[in-house]
Image (cartoon, rainbow, N blue to C red):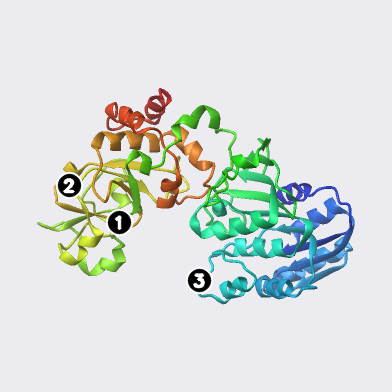
Amino acid sequence: MTPSIIARFMAALFDDPVRPASLLDAGAGIGSLTIAAVARLGNIASVDAWEIDALMQTHLRQTLTLLQVEYQVHAEDFIPSAVQQIALANGRRYTHAILNPPYAKLNSNSIHRALLRKVGIETVNLYTAFVALAVLLMQTEGELVAIIPRSFCNGPYYRPFRQLILKHCSLDRIHVFESRTNAFKDDDVLQENVIIKLVRGKKQGDVVVSSSHDQRMADYSARTVPFSGIVKPADPEVFIHIPTRHHNSERDAHLFRHSLEEIGLEVCTGPVVDFRVSAHWLSEPLEHSIPLVYPHHFSTGKLVYPKPHKKPNALVNDPSLRPWLMKNDWYVLVKRFSSKEERRRIVGYVYNPAEIPTDWIGFENHWNVIHSQHRGIDPVLAKGLVCFLNSTVLDKHFRVFSGHTQVNATDLRNMKYPRRDVITSWGERYRDNLTQAEIDALIEQA
């Protein structure tokens, strides 16, 4: 449920009302958000609340009755109901919406995805589906406030959603909760939560960006940022960047100017999907077998191979596997998934081919592999790049546009890097077992 302090904060983002409010609350639960919104807006014409849980519905009706407002509880799935309402030219439209939507993936062949496509919505999660539908149900100048995971801000899967909300609305406010452990409706959502305010049909202006560590708001801070600092002009991905209070973009700008391609590098997801080659698994390497390297082989910060584990250490040397293997050479490996306890979002390692004498190597799918034309890279460049990837300044920069634990090849491809000669200079001073302070001091010298 939405804590009352969060509900009041969200409702306070609504402008002073100038007309009787028609309020939408989808996934209303027991009505916590509606209580806060009614208190803020005062003049309420009607409340439409959707909730499919029977027990919640009972409490919700009691809540709305006590509020003494005209209301309707829709004991049905919001998605088909909203799609039908949008499809009607004279369907109901709202002045305000306040949402804490459910979080769950939508399969591409699901009924929900088919329904959403009927009204021009292409998205992969329930929470973005709820917000997109609410946007299309708003009147001109209607205000929408929602608390949602931050995963929509980047990545190709959410690009249509970003395009939709920015086409129809101005993005007026963003509040980010920096703790990943305080999830809203699902304890397994290991990413930052944000509160956004959208206004339907309003011309885009500056954006107020605020932050706090958690729901207590004890360390709340806010600043106004030009929209060009949130969505970079002409960015085809329409990534939404959220500058943090710890991020000094002007001071560090020279470190983020060049693409991977411009410094002669590429990145791919680890080519070996282990379950697809399970017939070739070997628990222990044999003579002429192909080493298969997982992130757990680096769990101590350095390569430990072979390592006892439920996963295989090697693959049978079969010519049919060659398309998924890489020449044994120097690479930079970046974990695709970090745990919530991980201090940094990006965790990189140098892969040294001398540690596993072999001709070919298999990198499992939970890696991002930085390479050059599917071959190895200069070892000094690899060492310098790992210094940069594991630095605090890079971590703060990356958090501006990514709030979840997954780091995709697309993220690394779209990120900017220092000049190649600067990276090489770090590599020349690299040594094993550098502390975080030593890495940061090395980067700071640039």
Q: Does 204 sit above or below residue 425? A: below
Horizontal relation, residue 69 to residue 146: left or right: right
Number of other residues with Cα within 10 Å of mark 3, as a class: few under 14, some 14 to 19, many 20 or more: few
Residue designated by label 3: 108
Number of other residues with Cα within 10 Å of mark 1, as a class: few under 14, some 14 to 19, many 20 or more: many
Residue designated by label 2: 356
Mark 2: amino acid: Ile
Q: Residue at x 62, y 64 (%)?
A: 129
Residue designated by label 1: 364
Residue 319: x and y, percent? 16, 65
Q: Does 284 sit above or below residue 213? A: below
Q: What element carries label 1?
A: loop
Mark 3: amino acid: Ser
Return the residue found at the far top.
445
Mark 1: amino acid: Glu
Residue 138: x and y, percent? 76, 62
Image quadrant where one finds the C terminus: top left
Q: Residue 281 carries which label?
A: none
Q: Residue at x 61, y 71 (%)?
A: 116
Of residues 13 and 162, which is closer to you in this image? 162
Image quadrant where one finds the N terminus: bottom right
Q: How far apart are marks 2 and 3 (CA)?
A: 41 Å
Residue 279: x and y, percent? 22, 70
Q: Is residue 108 visible?
A: yes
First-in-chain label (1 vs 3): 3
First-in-chain label (2 vs 3): 3
Q: How far apart are marks 1 and 3 (CA)?
A: 25 Å
